[in-house]
Image (cartoon, grey):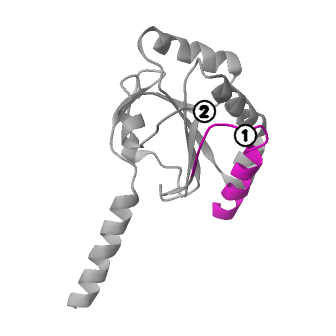
Amino acid sequence: MKKTLLIALLALISVASNALPSVQLKDINGNVVNTAELLNDGKPFIISFFATWCKPCMRELEAINDNYIDWQEETGVKMILVSIDEGQNVAKVKPLVDSKGWDFQVLLDPNSDFKRAMNVQMVPSLFILDGEGNVIEAHTGYTDGSEENIIEILRKNAK
């Protein structure tokens, strides 16, 4: 009995240590979102930190957007953007997202609380998470064509 309880406790600690940090952010419509509750019904999801002024971020997000519908159909993936724009630039996020036609969930992190909690040093920074919310891949920067690596990882982790 003690051994079973210890194993269950260790498993719970392991799951908790892989969980997303809990930070209260607002989405581009003003709704409050707790980052620890970001999930995708057991399917993989992507969290991408970006800024409106970041040219590599825009290239990466456009490349993902070009493939997003196919990726969703194949893997069920969900894309979550986290803007690190501060001050007056925060007001540019929603018009940018709308003008690009991005069908992504977009969160605002103007104080960099979630950015710090995820140990993001620069943008773009992208995290791929499995259906339980565990980070399975992370990369910083963007190289043309790197979205092919993203879909391969998603395929391996889709249920």
* Extreme residue toward the left, this view: 2
Residue 77 on image: x %, y %: 63, 48
> Considering the numbered disc 2 on the image, is that residue within a helix, a strand or a loop?
loop
Query: Counting residues from the N terminus, which is met first, the one under dot 2 or under dot 1?
Result: 1
Mark 2 in CB contact with mark 1 (< 8 angstroms)? yes
Quarter assignment of residue 31:
top left
- Residue wearing tag 1: 68
Q: Is residue 138 left or right of residue 23?
A: right
Residue at the spot x=37%, y=46% of the render?
Answer: 36
Question: What percent of the width, then of the height, locates residue 39?
Answer: 48, 49
Q: Which residues are magenta?
A: 138-159
User: Where the N terminus falls, by quadrant?
Assistant: bottom left
**Residue tagged 2:** 104
Q: Is residue 112 magenta?
A: no
The quadrant in which the C terminus is found is: bottom right
- Secondary structure of the residue carrying numbered label 1: helix
Q: Residue type at mark 1? A: Tyr
Name the amino acid, label 2.
Phe
Give the residue displayed 66% in from the left and 22% down from the top.
55
